[in-house]
């Protein structure tokens, strides 16, 4: 039973100070508190998702980053709830201070993470793990402040109208969970596509501090001393000023940070909806580098070594019909089209934005030899695994898996036994499958896990590696110094149905850097890295 403006009941905790002196009726005041709960919950979840998304983009491995952020935050929320017990006797002032701090830290977290990644990640030493340490620190701080909200809001709503504990908790958490739903949907569908991560986080912080300040300074102002009101007002205005200034400078900051990461000759930087695509160089004789979500995918100085090694050994047999999984940049297709006898090339690429750049960007289209304009080439925008499940077309003579490294969690399904089983289904009886399996020297276990997985799917494999100067691998070079952070080789697996491993031959394509003697030596070098007894990777148990 609810008793409006009830006096403190016998045995009430010391923090109970009687009914709040409100400028509105208790029912209206209670509604306004629940609206604030709704808004703060939405902002809190946006902070969480923003940290997960930004960490995944900067450091890769989204499963690990999400686990770190969410587990640290939930732990910190529990500690924050316990710590807020000491503020219950000053619930209004405490809540106002918590919201100001949360808005400042949460709103600026994306910009701070990007700054540390851009300007310190390449320093080495104690700075090498700077972004990861800062991620944990932000997760901890934001979790502590979010955890402190609930006890303080419970105190405020009880001071408006005394209610049984179960009913008050139900109302509070209903508003909290609905707000979390709205925040969770707003982040991927509104904030991220229309504002981006930096401005989206800053706007969320602005909404957060305005909602908290309006509740405390508007609804509970009579419970605050004059000094407390001015202190909270000045703190809120300061936070708003910092967030507004950061939003005004976000464009210049992003350009400067991008130059620090990719070099000074960045020409194109677009968020396609699937990934961020950055093109650096490619004009006036400069080599073109293609970055996908911060990782160098194509290095113009020796991308030809990678694509030649990927394609030529696979096309030594029949190759009238070729399927390329990935390869939206058109570079693998360029190598395929150099071979006589190719009648059709199908490309299955997830990102239509990358395909548009491959067709229209002058640097990238020149590098791929305008391969996507060739009438023999057909591009389908789809997830490779889904497309393989649904396709019922004729068999392919060659299947080329030109996909990101197996160490990236989001792409682990593309190196699974199930994926290779589907690829085997579309391969002609005497066809060949070639797989880019990541760097051999740096990650031999992942490379040989791909080999074991192919064998489990019914293929015999011939491994080989090609040394490079650090280009189309998982990491990218420091363009300002010319030093490369990438692995120094690429690993490939040539596979065929049955028990007989396919022979490694260079084939009859246009002469390039790849020679038969070099390919034989590279195959021996790959064999020397063999790791025995590695388990097979599947969809439900990825091993990379």
Image (cartoon, rainbow, N blue to C red):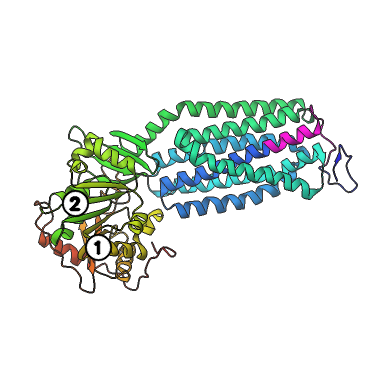
| Residue 248 drawn above or below residue 347 | above
Residue 451: give x, y in percent of width and height.
29, 67
Identify the residue at horizontal 19%, vertical 65% (top origin).
523
| Residue 230 drawn above or below residue 139 | above
Distance (Cα) linking label 1 and label 2: 14 Å
Residue 57: give x, y in percent of width and height.
42, 45
- Left or right of 462 on screen, residue 42: right
Question: Element type at marker 2?
Answer: strand
The magenta segment is 16-35
Alpha-carbon neighbours of circle 2 within 10 Å: few (<14), some, or many (≥20)?
some
Asked whether 416 falls inside the magenta stretch, the response is no
Q: Quadrant of residue 406?
A: bottom left
Identify residue for label 1.
427
Identify the residue at horizontal 38%, vertical 59% (top origin).
413
- Left or right of 64 on screen, residue 205: right
Mark number displayed over residue 288: none
Identify residue for label 2.
344
Q: Nearer the viewer, residue 14 or 218?
A: 218
Q: Quadrant of residue 151?
A: top right
Q: Earlier in the sequence, mark 1 or mark 2?
A: 2
Q: Nearer the viewer, residue 514 or 24?
A: 24
- Left or right of 294 on screen, residue 493: left
Alpha-carbon neighbours of circle 1 within 10 Å: few (<14), some, or many (≥20)?
many
Q: Quick check: can you spot residue 63?
A: yes
Which quadrant of the figure contains the C terminus? bottom left
Residue 496: give x, y in percent of width and height.
22, 67
Extreme residue toward the right, this view: 10
Q: Quick check: can you spot residue 128?
A: no
């Amino acid at each position: 039973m609810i008793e409006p403006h009830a006096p403190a009941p016998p045995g009430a905790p010391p923090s109970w100070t009687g009914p709040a002196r409100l400028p509105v009726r208790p029912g209206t005041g209670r509604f306004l508190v629940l609206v604030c709960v709704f808004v703060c919950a939405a902002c809190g979840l946006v902070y969480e998702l923003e940290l997960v998304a930004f960490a995944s983009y900067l450091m890769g491995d989204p499963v690990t980053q999400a686990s770190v952020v969410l587990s640290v935050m939930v732990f910190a929320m529990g500690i924050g709830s316990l710590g807020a017990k000491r503020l219950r006797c000053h619930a209004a002032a405490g809540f106002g201070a918590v919201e100001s701090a949360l808005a400042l830290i949460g709103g600026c977290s994306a910009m701070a993470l990007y700054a540390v990644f851009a300007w310190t990640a390449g320093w080495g030493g104690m700075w090498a793990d700077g972004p990861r340490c800062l991620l944990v620190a932000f997760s901890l701080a934001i979790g502590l402040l979010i955890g402190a909200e609930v006890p303080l809001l419970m105190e405020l709503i009880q001071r408006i109208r005394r209610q049984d504990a179960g009913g008050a908790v139900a109302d509070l958490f209903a508003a909290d969970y609905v707000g979390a739903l709205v925040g969770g949907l707003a982040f991927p569908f509104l904030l991220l596509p229309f504002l981006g991560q930096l401005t989206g986080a800053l706007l969320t912080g602005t909404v957060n501090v305005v909602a908290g300040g309006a509740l405390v300074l508007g609804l509970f102002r009579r419970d605050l001393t004059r000094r407390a009101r001015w202190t909270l007002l000045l703190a809120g205005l300061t936070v708003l000023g910092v967030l507004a200034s950061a939003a005004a400078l976000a464009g210049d900051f992003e350009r400067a940070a991008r130059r620090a990461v990719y070099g000074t000759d960045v020409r194109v930087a677009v968020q396609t909806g699937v990934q961020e695509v950055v093109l650096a160089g490619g004009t006036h004789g400069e080599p073109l580098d293609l970055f996908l979500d911060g990782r160098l995918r194509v290095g113009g100085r020796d991308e030809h070594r990678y694509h030649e090694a990927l394609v030529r050994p696979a096309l030594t047999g029949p190759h009238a019909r070729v399927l390329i999984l990935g390869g939206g940049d058109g570079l693998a297709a360029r190598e395929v089209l150099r071979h006589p006898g190719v009648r059709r090339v199908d490309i299955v690429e997830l990102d239509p934005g990358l395909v548009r750049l491959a067709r229209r960007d002058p640097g990238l289209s020149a590098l791929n030899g305008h391969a996507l304009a060739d009438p023999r080439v057909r591009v389908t925008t789809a997830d490779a695994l889904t497309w393989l499940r649904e396709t019922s077309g004729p068999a392919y003579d060659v299947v080329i898996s030109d996909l990101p490294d197996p160490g990236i969690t989001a792409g682990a399904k593309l190196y699974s036994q199930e994926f290779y089983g589907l690829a085997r289904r579309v391969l002609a009886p005497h066809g060949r499958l070639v797989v880019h399996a990541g760097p051999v020297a740096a990650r031999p276990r992942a490379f040989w896990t791909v080999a074991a997985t192919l064998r489990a799917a019914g293929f015999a494999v011939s491994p080989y590696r090609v040394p490079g100067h650090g280009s189309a691998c998982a990491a990218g070079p420091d363009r300002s110094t010319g030093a490369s952070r990438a692995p120094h080789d690429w690993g490939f697996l040539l596979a065929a149905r049955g028990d007989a491993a396919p022979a490694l031959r260079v084939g009859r394509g246009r002469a390039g850097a790849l020679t038969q003697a070099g390919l034989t030596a590279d195959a021996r070098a790959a064999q020397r890295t063999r790791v025995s007894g590695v388990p097979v990777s599947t969809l439900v148990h990825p091993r990379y």
